[in-house]
Image (cartoon, rainbow, N blue to C red):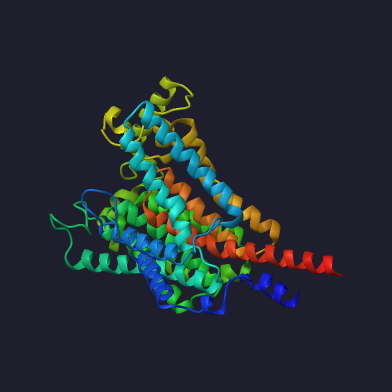
Amino acid sequence: MIENTRRLTTGTSPFRSATQTRPTGRSRAKRYIIYSAIFLSPFLNLKAEFVYFTASDGLYILALMLIVLQGDLRKFPLGQVGPFWITAFVLVSSGIYLSSLFVGDAWRGVALCLQYFFCFILLPQILIQDDEDEAYRLIIAFILGILALDIHGIITFYTVGYTPDSRVVTGGMRLATLNGTANGAARLNAMAIVITLWLFNIRRISILTFLCFITTMVVALVLTSSNTGLIATVTGLTTYFALTFRPALILRIIPAIAVIAAFFLLGGVEYLPATFQRRVLGAVLSGDITEAGTFVDRTALMLEALEMIASRGFTLLGIGADQFRLYSVQQTPVHNTFLLLWIEGGVLSLAGWLLMSTMGVIVWLLAWRQHVIPHGRAAVFVCFAVFVTLSSASAHIYARYWYTALILVMQPTIIAMSQGNREKSVARMLARTR
């Protein structure tokens, strides 16, 4: 009886032998492969030429093979969150596939569904752990990957600059990093800034580490000259402070606010990159959003999508994967995931993405009901809020690093909820034996 209680509390299986719980050479190899895959996930330029498959994807597949060989595949890696997550995937992918099969290009539908399958189904199997400390180490590995990306990009920006074959600096003198695009690099740093603040707030990183990380990310964000990245950062920080408001936290960030205010008051604007001043600062100071980068072009694409949706009506099926660009005057997909999935995947895909967009609220409510990990559930809520902001300015989102970030941030909360459920099970079992 005591032994069974101990197993329920620790989460160990009564059918696993002692030799199976010891780290083996294969399990250590799997661990380092996963670390490397997470670290490299933002490096999108390290990919195959003929298909969207990155170096990080290759490492993820290798880790998955080791998981299968060890017999460690899980039925429900995401715990209570799993049904919502799977339902979102099924709706998004079924809408895309059926629309492509009956209306558009079936092969493009299969290819796009496979990309989403990798993100929604395979990544949770690879990334979800049982150990809380290990979960935070994986998050830090992700942040270190972004820092490496930023440091390489900043050095390249100021030493080499733009060259015709450059993948790091665009012709418009915007920092793209090895992520591939300036907007992508900005959005990545927007998410990383929020995660770093969370890690500092729960004392998983020191104040010196926090300042070094944040400084690098802010510099990189400014060099990208991205309005979307700036909006996502402000949205994330505002939401996080609202959910975790404490006077002590405000006092801790007052020095940073004072430094920023002094920078602008003492004429620091002149030292900002010219591209940032032209694309971002002008819109901020004037309050005219039409001055913000390519806002007019993206708005025109959204209007095209809305007109097409209105002409087709509220249909179950869309026009099929990657078909919008064939109809568009600009011959490019609309940079709004909600509209793009609606027109290409129909109502099913739109419903799936709306469910995905509310995942942060769902996780927050589930954790709130169990009274677990307040800062963790707030971080989940905020990261999904940033993700939704990015969805409003992006086409299809199947880059693995986004889902890597979301799964890793959810992981401590999922672990805490699972532990809470195990403790309740133990309590009920003890109550029955009395």
Q: Quadrant of the N terminus?
A: bottom right
**Residue located 61% across and 62% down the image:** 244
Query: x, y (%) of residue 270?
Result: 29, 61
Which quadrant of the view contains residue 5?
bottom right
As rendered, which of 97 and 237 lies closer to the eye?
A: 97
Horizontal side of 224 relative to 190 (left or right) equals left
Horizontal side of 86 relative to 300 (left or right) equals right
Q: Residue furthest right?
A: 434
Query: x, y (%) of residue 12?
Result: 61, 71
Q: Quadrant of the C terminus?
A: bottom right
As rendered, which of 140 and 307 lies closer to the eye?
A: 140
As rendered, which of 117 and 191 lies closer to the eye?
A: 117
As rendered, which of 1 and 392 lies closer to the eye?
A: 1
Image position of 113 with respect to 53: above or below: above
Horizontal side of 183 relative to 317 (left or right) equals left
**Residue located 33% across and 42% down the image:** 111
Image position of 9 with respect to 48: above or below: below
Query: x, y (%) of residue 293?
Result: 31, 45
Q: Residue furthest left?
A: 164
Does any portion of residue 398 appear in the rendered image?
Answer: yes
Does any portion of residue 269 appear in the rendered image?
Answer: no
Query: x, y (%) of residue 100?
Result: 36, 31
Image position of 146 with respect to 336: above or below: below
Horizontal side of 41 relative to 369 (left or right) equals left
